[in-house]
Image: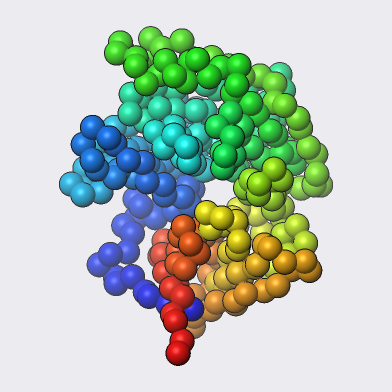
């Protein structure tokens, strides 16, 4: 792999740096009415922002969470649907086209502490996984509430008047760790999770003993990439047993914790967000 650094004039301002430190995720959402590809971002103030990257303007802002948002994810089958995980102990499902908060996952069976990560099932539109500082992973279903999801696309009244529903009980709760679970991703019918220890499931990641370091996978779940607190990235083959380390990526200027990685569709490009607000891009380079 070859590193492409981002020039200083393209690095993040202090405002964007806060987004990286408290959000660590950028997801594109296509808008069929304009043909644009806005970016959905959020951070410490608990507000979701839909940004028109082409015009460099904020398109919409959504208020609902009572504290900072730790992660967001778009629905692969319906990209207008965005789910957010917050410090306020809730997960929320949004329609970014209409500005509606459709569902709130919280209550008697919800998280008992800060929610750190959330993910949509790649092929089942009804299922969502979340994890957090209560040391649990929760598998939620929106099957019963899907009529409200459909209604959100045709809603023409004020978004505040939409009958937002609470989902209080997940399908199952897994207390799989003795400490925070700060990242989870669906891997087919399995959930790949990470805690604040040196093991990513059965994948050994050295110097990864601090929380809020998140991994990512390519679309087909062939590989996973994760950083550590020393600025290095480890890329693992998810299709082999025992695990095979594909690549160990490092750079002399990357010395701080890598908080988030993002792999492209085919895994040929990896983006990483560092604690100093810089982003790094790594590309696979063909050798002949």
Q: Is residue 8 above or below residue 161?
A: below
Residue 238, image x, y percentages: 67, 62
Residue at (44, 22) in percent of width and height:
101
Locate the C terminus and report the quarter of the image it occupies: bottom left
Colour theme: rainbow
Give the camera-side residue of 283 and 198: 283
Q: Between 156 and 21, which is closer to the camera in this rendering?
A: 156
Residue 106, quarter of picture = top right
Q: Residue furthest front?
A: 288
Residue at position x 60%, y 16% from top? 144
Tell me residue 105's x, y (percent): 60, 24
Percent x, y of residue 175: 80, 39
In front: 67, or 285?
A: 285
Q: Position of residue 231 (x, y in %)?
A: 55, 72
- In the figure, residue 11 lies in which quadrant? bottom left
Left or right of 198 in this view: 271? left
For the question of whether residue 159 can be seen, the reply is yes
Q: Residue at x 59, y 76 (%)?
A: 247
In the picture shown, does residue 129 fall above or below 22? above
Q: Residue sitting at 61 percent across and 32 percent down? A: 127
Q: Name the one closer to the observer, 271 or 17.
A: 271
Q: Left or right: 128 with respect to 219?
A: right
Left or right? Give the position of 94 relative to 198: left
Residue 122 appears in which quarter of the rendering? Answer: top right
């Amino acid at each position: 792999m070859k590193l492409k650094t981002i020039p200083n004039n393209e690095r993040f301002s202090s405002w964007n740096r806060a987004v990286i430190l408290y959000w660590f995720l950028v997801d594109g959402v296509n808008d069929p009415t304009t043909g644009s590809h806005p970016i959905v971002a959020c951070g410490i103030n608990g507000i979701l922002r839909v940004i028109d990257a082409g015009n460099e303007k904020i398109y919409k802002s959504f208020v609902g969470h009572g504290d900072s948002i730790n992660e967001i994810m778009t629905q692969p089958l319906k990209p207008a649907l965005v789910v957010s995980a917050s410090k306020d102990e809730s997960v929320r499902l949004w329609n970014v086209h209409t500005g509606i908060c459709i569902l709130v996952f919280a209550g008697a069976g919800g998280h008992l502490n800060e929610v750190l990560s959330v993910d949509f099932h790649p092929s089942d539109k009804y299922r969502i996984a979340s994890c957090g500082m209560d040391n649990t992973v929760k598998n939620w279903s929106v099957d019963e509430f899907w009529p409200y999801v459909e209604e959100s696309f045709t809603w023409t009244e004020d978004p505040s008047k939409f009958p937002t529903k609470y989902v209080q009980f997940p399908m199952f709760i897994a207390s799989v760790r003795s400490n925070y679970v700060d990242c989870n991703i669906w891997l087919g019918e399995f959930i790949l999770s990470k805690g604040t220890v040196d093991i990513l499931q059965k994948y050994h990641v050295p110097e990864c003993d601090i929380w809020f370091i998140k991994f990512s996978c390519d679309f087909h779940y062939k590989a996973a990439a994760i950083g550590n607190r020393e600025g290095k990235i480890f890329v693992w083959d998810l299709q082999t047993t025992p695990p095979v380390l594909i690549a160990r990526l490092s750079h002399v200027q990357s010395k701080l914790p890598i908080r988030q990685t993002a792999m492209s569709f085919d895994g040929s490009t990896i983006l990483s967000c560092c604690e100093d607000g810089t982003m790094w891009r790594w590309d696979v380079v063909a050798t002949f």
